[in-house]
Structure formats: C-alpha cells, structure tokens
Image: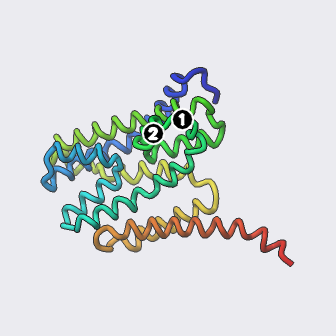
Amino acid sequence: MHYKSAMHAFTEGVRAVLPLMTGMVPFGLITGVTAIGIGMSPLDAMGMTLLFYSGSAQMVVLQLMQSGALPLTMAVTALVINLRFLMYSAALAPHLSDLPRRKRWSLSYLLSDQSFALCSLKFGTDGLGRFAFPYYLGTALPMWFGWNLAVLAGVYLGTGIPESWSLGFAIPLSFLALLVPGIRNPALLGAAVVGGALAVLVHDLPYNLGLLVASLGGVISGLGIEQLRKGAPVAAEAP
C-alpha cells in the first residue's frame, strides 16, 4: 500500500493496531489489580508501569514480589523476558536507522510486541520508505496510551472486577493473534512449538523459571532449525 502523506501512514498504523488492543486491555486491568493486591500504592504501581512498559515482565515481577523472591531474581527475570526486544530492534533497525538519535530513543521505549508484529509484516512487503517512522508511531502510541490507561483502571477498580469476567483468558488469545501471522518459516514454527510445549511441561517450576526455560528452549530450537536449513544445501553438494 502506498501512502499519500505521513499522516496517512500514521492513521493506517493506528487502524492496524486497534484490533490488537482488545487483548491488551484485560491484560492491563489484571496487572493493575495485581499491583494493588500485593500492597503497592497507586503511585508506585503506575510508576512501575511507566518504567517497565512490558506487560509480561511486569506481571512476572509482581508475582515474584508476592512470593518474596530476591530483588536480583526479579531483575534477572525481567531482563531475560525482555531480551526479545533486542531481536525486535535488530529486525527493525534497517528500516529506521536513518532517523535522528532522539527519534530512535523514543521508538525504542515505545516498542511492543504488537508494534513489532505489524511493522515487521509491513516493512517486509513494501518497505514503506520515508513513511516507516509515522507508520510505526501509529502502531506504538495507541498501545502505549491504552496500556497505561488499562493499568490505571485496574489500579482504581482493584478487586471490584468480578472473577466471572475471566479477563485472564484474553491474555493468551492476544498473544496468539500476534504469533500465528508471524510464523512464516520452519524455524519460527519450530521455536513456537518447542517453546509452547516446554511452557506446559515446566509450568510448575518455582519462581516462574518455567517461562525462562520455555523462552530459551524456543530460541535455541529456532536457531538450530535455521542452521540446519542453511547447512542442508551445502551437505547435499559435498562429494
């Protein structure tokens, strides 16, 4: 799709990300409720949200705080969970590297799973060229505002959200909506299958280590499959 202006690209980015925000809202509500439930003040809960801007890492750290884990364990766990953003940044960098540093810093803070999924698909098809920046902002800004408002609502609603709403069910569905369109080769499929299987098998490990094991297993499997794919033609041509 060819955009007529930067505003047109921004608007299309907003339009693309809006359906994905339906899964983010209950995630944010649960995060806010959890923060208040373990005794955090509203100011601390929102400060944590603004500092992290990573729902999965924030939720895991809140659970670790509730179980009395060591601060070092919390910090390492959050860093490991967020390692995926290094890969996201490396994938998006060729399309945004010409921007001034002040813009690149802001983009790095606003990066989310949803923005990466949408932008990687869009950049991979038509590149967007000079409209890459406004399109990215169109996907990123609504997510940032929506997430913080959802957590804020959870903070002030607290335990007033009925359990019958089953908000937690929407969280995995939102990530599945991101995962499925992104599986475009055997390496990604292998990483998804292995990571998902490990997540089920090691779910009961203490301190949420199951998440770490599943993440590392998925990444290693994907890299291994990719190396096998690259090496297969070479092995076939060898005498």
Q: Nearer the viewer, mark 2 or mark 1?
A: 1
**Residue 175 x/y as whole percent:** 43, 51
The amino acid pointed to by label 2 is Leu
Label located before the other in sequence (2 or 1): 1
15 or 222, which lies in front?
A: 222
- In the rendered image, the quadrant that contains the N terminus is top right
**Residue 209 x/y as whole percent:** 35, 70
Among the 4 quarters of the image, the one containing residue 23: top left
Q: In this view, does 95 lie above or below 217?
A: above
Among the 4 quarters of the image, the one containing residue 26: top left
198 or 152, which lies in front?
A: 152
Q: Report whether 236 appears left or right of 224.
A: right
Which residue, given by chain and number where applicable, does mark 1 sit on?
99
Give the residue furthest to the bottom.
239
Q: Report whether 85 appears left or right of 164.
A: right
- In the rendered image, the quadrant that contains the C terminus is bottom right
- Residue at 41 percent across and 73 percent down: it is 201
Among the 4 quarters of the image, the one containing residue 141: top left
Q: Report whether 109 appears left or right of 184.
A: left
**Residue 174 x/y as whole percent:** 42, 48
Q: Is residue 64 above or below residue 7?
A: below
- Residue at 37 percent across and 70 percent down: it is 210
- Residue at 59 percent across and 40 percent down: it is 95
The answer to whether the residues at label 2 and label 1 have Cβ atoms under 8 Å apart is: yes
Q: In this view, does 124 lie above or below 57?
A: above
Mark yes or no: residue 220 visible: yes
State the SS at label 2. Answer: helix
Which residue, given by chain and number where applicable, does mark 2 sit on?
107
